[in-house]
Amino acid sequence: MAPATSLFVENPTETPSQASKRMSIKTLVESPGLTSIPSNYSYSLNPNESAGSEPDETIPTIDFSLLTSTDPHQRSKMIQDLDRACREWGFFMLVNHGVPKSLMKETLDGCNQFFNLPMEEKKEYEGKDIWKPIRFGTGVDVKIEKFFFWRDFLKVYVHPQFNFPNNPKGFSEVAEEYSKRTREVIKELLKGVSESLGFERSYIEKAMNLESGLQIFAVNLYPLCPQPELAMGIPAHTDHGLLTLLIENEIGGLQIQHNGKWFNVNPLPNSFLVNTGDHLEILSNGRYKSIKHRAVVNNKATRISIAVPLGPSLDTVVSPAPELIEGESGRPAAYLPMKYKVYMDHQLEGKPCLDHVRLPVA
Ligand code: OGA
Ligand code: NI
């Protein structure tokens, strides 16, 4: 079968110790006279991966205020819309979510300031160990990268324990508030998703032990790129949690796969971009597929995005919901049970983690 992503380890071009010395993209871009990208950053799409285009259908929008409505008719219509969005797209834009615009902006500003800190300070957080609670780096999380990607990142575990860099001053407080608000939004969405799967509202919260669920504050920096058509910010991948909320500094770049084609996402102002993750696919026994997405780069402006996924607690063993695999209407389990922590440990291997648990379809 053709690989789902291009992260496979073939012809490694650098050893892990060389990788740790690789320049950040920000530093590379700030080096004088950069007019073309170094050849290692030249990325070729898989034969089964098309270039992005404008969507020919409307990307679904979910109105959060209606989802939390006390009017049962309104709510049940929203649950249906949520079901369709998760089933047909694995992606939607969330509006009227109640998270203040000012908090979203302050959080993005703080991220920008973090990347502007002196390199010595950011270097303190470097490393390939995915369990480090605060991590700064370049490229993607695999042991050996076949292609280099046009991206620097900061990844912080913000729940069940809140961690954060001390600098820039005041950023930690803003990020803590942002993490709390986005966690509440995701938990509310998952109540809707529980119902759209035919369960009671708190089903996912309980089954996935969300009171100690793993929440990550993942910031991507895509500095402007002199040859954007040759480079890639993040290659096609799926997120491993349940749902991810993403915001960006109004510079587009996110692309999603829908019916085999790749589409640009042009976010509605102040919306959250929401995508389904691997553990929702597993729990729903494949009803809601974890959507493939990627980020392209541009030569106009630096793009920053913040992805906040929420997943089960690390010690939760996730399997398809038993109610969905039993009885007349159920279908056989399509995924093996696996502890979330063990699942995440597969991340550095460079092939999609879902491949470790997906069973051949009978
Ligand atoms: C991610 C991600 C996309 C983007 O961080 O997992 O998919 O638009 N980011 O930056
Ligand atoms: Ni992602």
Image (tube, rainbow, N blue to C red):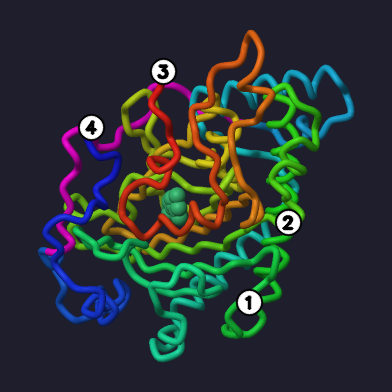
Q: Residue at x 37, y 23 (%)?
A: 259
- Element type at marker 4? loop
Mark 4 residue type: Met
Query: How far apart are the alpha carbons under marks 4 and 2?
Result: 41 Å
Q: In terms of sequence position, does the residue under pointer 4 or pointer 2 come before the other?
A: 4
Label disc, if present, on residue 40 of the rendered structure: none
Residue 1's label in the rendered image is: 4
Q: Amino acid at mark 2?
A: Arg
Magenta: main secondary structure equals loop
Report which residue position mark 2 lands on.
181
Give the SS element for disc 1: helix
User: Element under label 2?
Assistant: helix
Q: Residue furthest top?
A: 328
Of circles 3 and 1, the one toward us is: 3
Q: Which mark is residue 171?
A: 1
Q: State how far apart marks 3 and 1 are (Cα).
A: 50 Å
Q: Is residue 346 visible?
A: yes
